[in-house]
Structure formats: structure tokens, C-alpha cells
Image (spheres, helix red, strand yellow):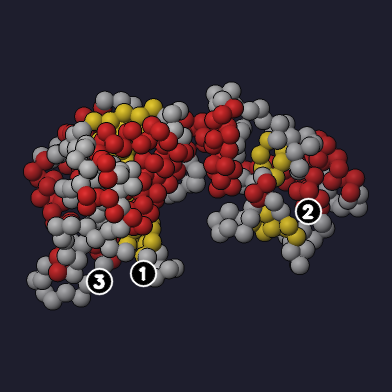
């Protein structure tokens, strides 16, 4: 590292007790370091990007001649701060792969990534470069999918391929903000691609009008190009999530799905081989649910499924932005989110957020020891399983 610098977003300050707090006051980022001799504060102040490591060490030693300190101690402290994610290299060159216009366009996003990023990197632009090199398959471009597509394109993903079979209807316009009244009766895909291309000409966009009717369709879509992630924003048939889980496990593709269920808005993300799969998480959620139903009563009565999804622009856009956030995390590693979890909001009660985590279940029929036997299930068998899962309630709409 040429010139170590505490990230501007992680600027340190001293507490009334004399400790050093670094990394901002955001939970999950900041840390507090005891500093009884005061040299930690001198060290972080010296790490302002104008000095190399040797100069930093020399300045701290001069400022604290009576401290029991050596060069090795200070270099180790610099390394500790770097490994904790609080330091960047002020001497890192601008990335040649990004034009000056791209650096200007994505500069604010880079600083947010730098704030959330606790992984030591050669350049703060590395996450943006990962996005620029990524290919994403997005299934569904309605309320959730349209918002996700907008945010992904604005954020600078390299290539986005959209799959959507429907046409624009008047009832879509209360939430599907990629479309206007003039688009009614037109294919959603065409209108979406036109809007997205106007938003960011640097992103490669493609699409196809196609309905996903089974796992083979998803497998064919993923096989058409080397996609880095699948983002699922389709809600029919309900078994489509099981299909996505099955196909992504088979191909090793990271994926996420999001939607809304009344005032509940959530996203779940998965990385095959790490953490719970969708079935692990789903089965754990079902086991934790306490509905107090009479014996033999169908769980559908506690969470009825309607022919329409109650939704407005807020719930659709929130779910889409959460889906984009999960996709950006899977693609760039920022922020680091442990896969195999669902999180989101309860819009009825601020602070009463949605959060579900589960360990990988050894006996899971999808990713457990018998997963290989289940990968060959027919579409009909998967649909039967999905109908039962949907009846337990909680499957979000799009």
C-alpha cells in the first residue's frame, strides 16, 4: 500500500474516555479501540494519505518517545486497521477500465460501497469494476422487476438480460413505474428496454418475451450465457421459486428473489454451497410459524391467496430496490451479506423488520445429501410441492 489513508467515511474521533472510535457510528461497521497512551489517535491522524508506511511510523514514534512502542508494533497496527476494512490506498491509480465519465457517473456509488466495504482492496473502485464485468439474468419486469432493473442499470452492471412475457395493462400503472399510459397494450419487455436504455447507455441490455413454465426453461436461460446471478421477480406460478432453487443449485448460480405480501416487503438471497438454500430457509420458516390453527385446518385460511396482489408503488419499488441491493451484494461483495437469509420491512410497524436466517439443513431435499436424487424431479412433481409450500402463507407477490 503506497499511502495508507483512513477512509473518509470511516474518519475516527476520540471519545470522552479517550478511546478511538473508527468506522462511523453505523452498526456493523464501527469499532472502538482503547488508547490509554494516546498513540492510536496519533496513528490514525497520521494515516491521512500524505505519508507512506515508514513515514507514518516515524511520525508516531517522534510524537510518543516515552511509549513502549517499536516499529513492528506500529506496522502491525496499520495492518490491523487495514484488515478491518478502515483503510484505503490514497496512492492507488485511477482504474483504466473506467472512463472519466463513468467515474463521474458512479462516483457517489463508489463512496457508498467504500463505506460499506470491510474487505481490504487495492482500489476503492474494485467493487464497481466487478459490477461492470457482471452479467445478470432478471426474470420478471413488472413492479418488483422493473424497479430492480432500473436500480441495476443506474448502478452500472455490465449486462442485464430481462425475461418478461406480458403486455402493459392499465392496472399495472399504479406500481410499475417503467411504463406510461402510452405503453398500454404494448409488450412490457419492449417498453422496459426502451426506458432502461435511455437511463444508461453504458449498460448492455437484452431481453426476450418468454414465460417460465418449468425448471427446464430456467436452466435453458442460464445456459444461454455465463450469468453471474439470477434475480427472480416473477410470482407465478408460486412453484417458480423452487424451480429457481433447483436450477441454481445444479448450476452453482447465486440468486435472489423478492416481493411483497401486503405491507410486508422482503428479499432473500442464496449462494449455492454457502449457507441455507431456499428450501432450507423455507422449511425453517414454516417450522417457526405459530398459527394456532385447529387440528386439520388448512393453513391457507391464515394467509389467503387472492387472484390479485394488494400493492402500490411504494411496496413494489421497495421490493425491487431490495432485490437490486441483494444482486449488487452478490455481484460485488458489498455489503457482505451472509447468504441463506430473508430480510425486509413491515410497513405497518417501523422497527418491526423482517429477518429470517437458517442454517443449511443436512437432510434438505434440495441441497442435502439426497439433493442429487431430487434434481431430476419432473415439472409436475415440483408444481405439487410448490402448491403445498404456497399454502403455508408468506410467499411474496411481484
SS category of the residue bearing label 1:
loop
Q: Are the residues tagged 3 and 1 within 8 Å (C-beta)?
A: no
- Residue 272 seen by the camera: no
Q: Position of residue 78 (x, y in %)?
A: 72, 43
Q: Which tag, 1 or 2, sits closer to the chain's start?
A: 2
Q: Which tag, 3 or 1, sits closer to the chain's start?
A: 3
Q: Nearer the viewer, mark 3 or mark 1?
A: 1
How far, Cα to Cα, is label 1 from label 2?
44 Å
How far, Cα to Cα, is label 3 from label 2?
51 Å
Residue at numbered disc 3: 290
Residue at numbered disc 1: 348
From this viewpoint, which residue is outermost toward the front?
182
Q: Position of residue 358 (x, y in %)?
A: 34, 56
SS category of the residue bearing label 2:
helix
Quadrant location of the N terminus in the rendered image: top right
**Residue in view at x 64 percent, y 49 percent:** 9
**Residue in view at x 79 percent, y 61 percent:** 36
- Residue 63 seen by the camera: yes
Amino acid at each position: 500500500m503506497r499511502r495508507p489513508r483512513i477512509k473518509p467515511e470511516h474518519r475516527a474521533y476520540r471519545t470522552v474516555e479517550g478511546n478511538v472510535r473508527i468506522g462511523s457510528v453505523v452498526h456493523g461497521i464501527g469499532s472502538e479501540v482503547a488508547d490509554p497512551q494516546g498513540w492510536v489517535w496519533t496513528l490514525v491522524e497520521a494515516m491521512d494519505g500524505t505519508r507512506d508506511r515508514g513515514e507514518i511510523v516515524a511520525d508516531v514514534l517522534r510524537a510518543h518517545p516515552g511509549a513502549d512502542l517499536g516499529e513492528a508494533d506500529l506496522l502491525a497496527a496499520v495492518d490491523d486497521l487495514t484488515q478491518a476494512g478502515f483503510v484505503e490506498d490514497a496512492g492507488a491509480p485511477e482504474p483504466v477500465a473506467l472512463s472519466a465519465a463513468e467515474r463521474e457517473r458512479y462516483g457517489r456509488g463508489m463512496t457508498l460501497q467504500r463505506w460499506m466495504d470491510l474487505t481490504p482492496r487495492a482500489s476503492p473502485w474494485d467493487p464497481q469494476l466487478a459490477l461492470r464485468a457482471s452479467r445478470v439474468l432478471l426474470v420478471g419486469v413488472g413492479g418488483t422487476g422493473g424497479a430492480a432493473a432500473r436500480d441495476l442499470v443506474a448502478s452500472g452492471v455490465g449486462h442485464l438480460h430481462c425475461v418478461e412475457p406480458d403486455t402493459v395493462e392499465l392496472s399495472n400503472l399504479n406500481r410499475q413505474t417503467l411504463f406510461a399510459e402510452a405503453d398500454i397494450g404494448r409488450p412490457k419487455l419492449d417498453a422496459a428496454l426502451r426506458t432502461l436504455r435511455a437511463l444508461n447507455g453504458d449498460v448492455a441490455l437484452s431481453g426476450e418475451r418468454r414465460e417460465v413454465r418449468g425448471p427446464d426453461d430456467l436452466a435453458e436461460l442460464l445456459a444461454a450465457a455465463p450469468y453471474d446471478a439470477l434475480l427472480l421477480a416473477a410470482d407465478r406460478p408460486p412453484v417458480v421459486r423452487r424451480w429457481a432453487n433447483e436450477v441454481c443449485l445444479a448450476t452453482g448460480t447465486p440468486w435472489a428473489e423478492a416481493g411483497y405480501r401486503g405491507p410486508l416487503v422482503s428479499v432473500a438471497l442464496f449462494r449455492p454451497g454457502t449457507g441455507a438454500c431456499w428450501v432450507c430457509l423455507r422449511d425453517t420458516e414454516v417450522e417457526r410459524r405459530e398459527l394456532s390453527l385447529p387440528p386439520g385446518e388448512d393453513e391457507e385460511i391464515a394467509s389467503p391467496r387472492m387472484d390479485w396482489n394488494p400493492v402500490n408503488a411504494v411496496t413494489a419499488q421497495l421490493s425491487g430496490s431490495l432485490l437490486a441491493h441483494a444482486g449488487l451484494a452478490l455481484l460485488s461483495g458489498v455489503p457482505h451479506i451472509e447468504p441463506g437469509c430473508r430480510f425486509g420491512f413491515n410497513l405497518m410497524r417501523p422497527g418491526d423488520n423482517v429477518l429470517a436466517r437458517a442454517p443449511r439443513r443436512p437432510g434438505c431435499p434440495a441441497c442435502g445429501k439426497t439433493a442429487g436424487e431430487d434434481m431430476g424431479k419432473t415439472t409436475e412433481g415440483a408444481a405439487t410441492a410448490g402448491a403445498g409450500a404456497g399454502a403455508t402463507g408468506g410467499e411474496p407477490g411481484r
